[in-house]
Image (spheres, rainbow, N blue to C red):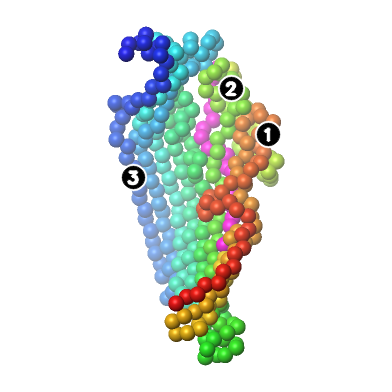
Amino acid sequence: MGTAALQAAAPVVIGWSLANKTPHAQSYTLNIQRQVTPSMLLEVGYGGSQGRALPGNVNLNEVEPGTGSNASRRLIQPLSNLTTITNYQERYRSNWNGLMVKVNQRASHGIAFLFSYSYGKAQDCTSPQSITFRCSNSYGVSTYSVKHRGVGTFIWDLPGNKLNSGANGPLGLIVGGWQLSGIVTGTTGIHFTPTLNAGVNNGAPSYPNQIASCKIANPSLKEWFNVAAFVAPPANTYGNMRAGPCTGPGSFSTDTSLVKQTQIHENMALQLRFEAYNLFNHPFFGLPNASIGGSSAGIISSTANNLITDAGDNRNLEAAIRFVF
């Protein structure tokens, strides 16, 4: 099909750059373990990874900023009717670096727990602002980057758990066989990138200028980030903002389980279970409206899933009876 036929048909074109290199990734870790007590192990480590020659798509026939019709400002003028010529190129890169701490307490005196914590940062340029922007122009914090993340699990055989209902009579039946366990998770928010409510490039991609920090002293649902830190650039120019300058709400959740197991025969037991998910009923808020220039910019008006457990429900209580044999 010739140029004239393509111009008349105006199909959507998707292609792969023949100059692409093979994508590759590297990861590395260094861990140090220390026996703190006969039953407790402490581990501190550094972890990192990086990706290079990562593929991503750009529109080869993007509209350039300026005056006149969109067609007159397409990058490939002989094919000005083709609004989208998607090309996958190996122009992107990413990296992650973090500190990791883990404390493992093996069962001792009826208590066992595991706590892990990570402090890290992920960066990339996998979503460039425009074909005219190279990776160095849009390189910033990844939208999935989480600075602080902690997870703790525990199992506690409550006092009296060793009492046997048969051997210790009514006392064993009441106070024996109880076990409390739980998972506590907490994380800071993921990153997001503000956009412009109204473009300034006459149909071409438009992005804000960042002139101040995104942070404010006391973020709330009505004002989560510094909206005034982002302004529209001069007409027909690209903004200077990099990816992921702002951080959304974090999340915290506690799930617990209280189990009472009563032995009724050598190979049979009756188990009562009481479980609570999101015990303290902490809400999981979504990201704020980040459309600069809009009336609701900076406002959080939705909830979202917990970043760790992928559950966004309110407190949920359950009870069950189980026969074990």
Visible residue check, residue 66:
yes
Residue 55 at x, y percent in the picture: 37, 33
Residue at numbered disc 1: 296
Q: Quadrant of residue 277?
A: bottom right
Crowd rating for badge 3 (residues with CA inside 10 Å; few <14, some 14–19, many 20+): few
Q: Nearer the viewer, residue 209 or 183?
A: 183
Nearer to us: label 1 or label 3: 1
**Mark number, residue 199:** 2
| Start-end of magenta stretch | 236-255
Magenta-span inclusion, residue 252 = yes
**Residue at left offset 46%, top offset 30%:** 128
Q: Which residue was labeled with disc 3?
A: 26
Assess whether mark 2 and mark 3 are in contact (beta carbons under 8 angstroms).
no
Q: Are marks 2 and 1 in contact (CB under 8 Å)?
A: no
Helix, strand or loop under label 3: strand
Seen from the viewer's position, the closer of residues 270 and 302 is 270
Identity, as a three-letter code, of the amino acid under mark 2:
Gly
Q: Seen in the image, is 2 located left or right of residue 73? A: left
3D distance between C-alphas at marks 2 and 1: 17 Å
Q: Is mark 2 on a helix, strand or loop?
A: loop
Q: Residue sitting at 41 percent across and 57 percent down?
A: 45
As shown in the figure, which amino acid type bears the numbered disc 3?
Gln
Q: Residues within 10 Å of mark 1 (few under 14, many from 20)?
A: some
Q: Which residue is drawn at 54% across and 41% down?
A: 191
C-alpha span from label 3 to label 2: 39 Å
